[in-house]
Each structure stands twice: as structure tokens, then as C-alpha cells.
């Protein structure tokens, strides 16, 4: 009797181990040569700024339509594609320049020269192919800015200290992909995604804990995102910024079979203190939601 019980327990352990192994999933981006993926990226941001006794609220809504045109594979086996911004729409209320609104597909030109220059800058980015090399984990290994684009933007924004530079353009493309684990994972497995964003006042480091929660009814992987943000000040910057608090949460729906993100969302709240030239102290809170959806 005892030996029978031992055999049953042994078989149960083998079955449990087998189920544990088969529960592992390989989460990797998958691409076919010459295919095109289309993504819509929407960002909504509310800024509350307090200077002395004055408080100002600004709301910014931006929508960007992108296409990923797969060219083939690199010598290392990574995917090489052209990422192209097809359209940018933006609206800002109660900002320093008042109401700002433009659409890169519109033929209307705003009367405000500063807003017009901003729109023209984005128009130069639209329909330009950024060549991106992406690993199967989603990590961007290389971004090539279209030849002549940076010079055209800088010429258009002459005298504007906040004009887009080479690093900013590359970062814009690097932020579009979700980073996945390099090994197979099961429910409750975690990994880390890191990103460094260069800003005029310093470097914002985003370290995100990614957790594979479960599969949904369609077999998609549901991934939780918990970002931790720190800011390293830039020496000699005219404005210094101290991050006083940050919190955020996000979720990704990843189609395992096709190897692509179906949708993602990230909510962030950042509170900071800013020391402007002349010793002016500014308290600022930013609430930002960014959503990316695969277009049908």
C-alpha cells in the first residue's frame, strides 16, 4: 500500500512539474519582412503650476499616428524597420502661449508666429522614415535620423533653446516599443525595463517593474507596469528641478501568437519643485496618460 501511495505522489509531482513547464510563455516581438503595423499613440497631460499665490492649470492633448514598415533583418538577426510618423494633432489650453491647436494634415496656418513655427517643426517630422533596429525583446538597438531632418528643424527653430535635437528625436522612437523578457516566463514572473530620457534640466530615469499577470480569454498576455522615476540634474542647466514625488501604473496587452502589442496604457503623476532664473520658485504637478493601440 505504501509503495502505491509513493508512486501516486511521484506521478502527481511529475504532472505538476509538467504543467509548470508548459505554463511558460515566450513573449517576443515577431515581424515579417515587408509587413506594416500601424499604431495610434494618444497622450493627455494636465499641468498644475503654482508660482507664489498664482495657480495656473494647463491641459495638453496630443495624438500621433505611426506606421512601422519592416525592411528585414540585420546581420545580428534583429529587425530593421522604418518608423514613420504619419500625423500629429495637438491641442493645449491655458498654456503660456494661450490656446495652441494644430494638425499636420491641416492647411490652416495659425496667426501666432510661435505656434506656427511649432507646427512647421512637426510637419518636417511627419512622413520622414526613421530607421530603427529592434531586438525581439523590443529593445531599440539603434535609431538613424533621416538625413537633413535635424538641420531643417534647427533652421526652422533658430533662436529657440528648446528646439528638438538629435537625442530627442531618437528618444521619440525608442519610447514606442514595449520591452519584454529575454527568457520564457509564467504568471507572476517579473523583469525590469529601464529608460533614460534626456531633458533640458537633466536626465529622467524610468525603471519599470514588469509583471506577467495572466492570459486573458483570447490568450493575450496581460502585463502590469510599475514605474519608478528619478531625476539627475544637469550641471549648468539654467533651470533646476527636484522631483518630490512620483507614482504610476500601467498595463500592456500583448498578443503572444502574433508577437505584438495590441494596446498599452501608462498613467503617471509627478510632483516637482523648479528653481527658475532669478530665484523664482515654482511648484508643479503633472498628470499624464499615454495610450498606444494597434490600428486595425
Image (tube, helix red, strand yellow):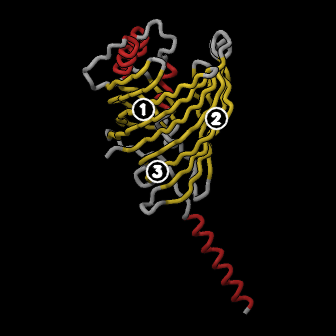
Residue 278 sits in which quadrant? top right
Which label was assigned to residue 270?
none
Give the x, y percent position of residue 118: 40, 17
Q: Secondary structure at mark 3?
A: strand
Work out whether residue 74 or residue 54 is closer to the camera in this orientation and state it. Answer: 54
Residue at far left of view: 107
Report which residue position mark 1 lands on: 61
Residue that badge 2 annotates: 229
Q: Nearer the viewer, residue 108 or 139?
A: 108
- Position of residue 143 measured from the top left corner of the image (x, y, whole percent): 47, 27
Tag 3 near tag 2, CB within 8 Å: no
Q: Residue furthest front?
A: 53
Mark 3 or 1, closer to the camera: 1
Residue 162 visible here: yes
The residue carrying mark 3 is: 254
| CA neighbours of label 2 inside 10 A, class few (<14), some (14 to 19), many (20+) | some
Q: Quadrant of residue 68?
A: top left
Say few, some or many: other residues with alpha carbon within 10 Å of mark 1 (under 14 / 14 to 19 / 20 or more). some
List the single residue furthest toward the bottom.
Answer: 1
Which residue: 61% across, 54% down? 189
Foreground pick, 7 / 166: 166
Measured in 3D between alpha carbons, the distance from the residue under mark 3 to the one under mark 2, in whole angstroms, is 24 Å
Q: Secondary structure at mark 1?
A: strand
- Which badge, 3 or 1, comes first in the chain's sequence? 1
**Residue located 43% across and 26% down the image:** 93
Q: Is residue 147 visible?
A: no
Image location (x, y in percent) of residue 99: 40, 22
Looking at marks 2 and 1 on the same chain, the residue that comes earlier in the sequence is marked by 1
Real-space Cα distance between discs 2 and 1? 22 Å
Amino acid at each position: 500500500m505504501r509503495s502505491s501511495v509513493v508512486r501516486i505522489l511521484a506521478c502527481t509531482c511529475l504532472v505538476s512539474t509538467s504543467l509548470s513547464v508548459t505554463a511558460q510563455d515566450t513573449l517576443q516581438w515577431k515581424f515579417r519582412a515587408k509587413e506594416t503595423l500601424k499604431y495610434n499613440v494618444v497622450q493627455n497631460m494636465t499641468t498644475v503650476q503654482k508660482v507664489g499665490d498664482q495657480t495656473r492649470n494647463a491641459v495638453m492633448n496630443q495624438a500621433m499616428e505611426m506606421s512601422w514598415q519592416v525592411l528585414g533583418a540585420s546581420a545580428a538577426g534583429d529587425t530593421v524597420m522604418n518608423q514613420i510618423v504619419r500625423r500629429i494633432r495637438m491641442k493645449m489650453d491655458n498654456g503660456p502661449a494661450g490656446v495652441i491647436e494644430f494638425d499636420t494634415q491641416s492647411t490652416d496656418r495659425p496667426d501666432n508666429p510661435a505656434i506656427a513655427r511649432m507646427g512647421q517643426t512637426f510637419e518636417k517630422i511627419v512622413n520622414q522614415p526613421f530607421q530603427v533596429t529592434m531586438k525581439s525583446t523590443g529593445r531599440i538597438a539603434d535609431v538613424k535620423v533621416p538625413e537633413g531632418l535635424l538641420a531643417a528643424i534647427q533652421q526652422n527653430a533658430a533662436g529657440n533653446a528648446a528646439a528638438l535635437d538629435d537625442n530627442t528625436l531618437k528618444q521619440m522612437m525608442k519610447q514606442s516599443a514595449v520591452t519584454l523578457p529575454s527568457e520564457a516566463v509564467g504568471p507572476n514572473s517579473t523583469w525590469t525595463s529601464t529608460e533614460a530620457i534626456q531633458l533640458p534640466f537633466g536626465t529622467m530615469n524610468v525603471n519599470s517593474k514588469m509583471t506577467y499577470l495572466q492570459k486573458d480569454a483570447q490568450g493575450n498576455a496581460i502585463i502590469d507596469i510599475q514605474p519608478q522615476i528619478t531625476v539627475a540634474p544637469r550641471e549648468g542647466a539654467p533651470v533646476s528641478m527636484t522631483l518630490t514625488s512620483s507614482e504610476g501604473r500601467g498595463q500592456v496587452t500583448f498578443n503572444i501568437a502574433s508577437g505584438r502589442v495590441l494596446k498599452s496604457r501608462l498613467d503617471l503623476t509627478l510632483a516637482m519643485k523648479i528653481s527658475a532664473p532669478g530665484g523664482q520658485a515654482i511648484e508643479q504637478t503633472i498628470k499624464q496618460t499615454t495610450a498606444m493601440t494597434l490600428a486595425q
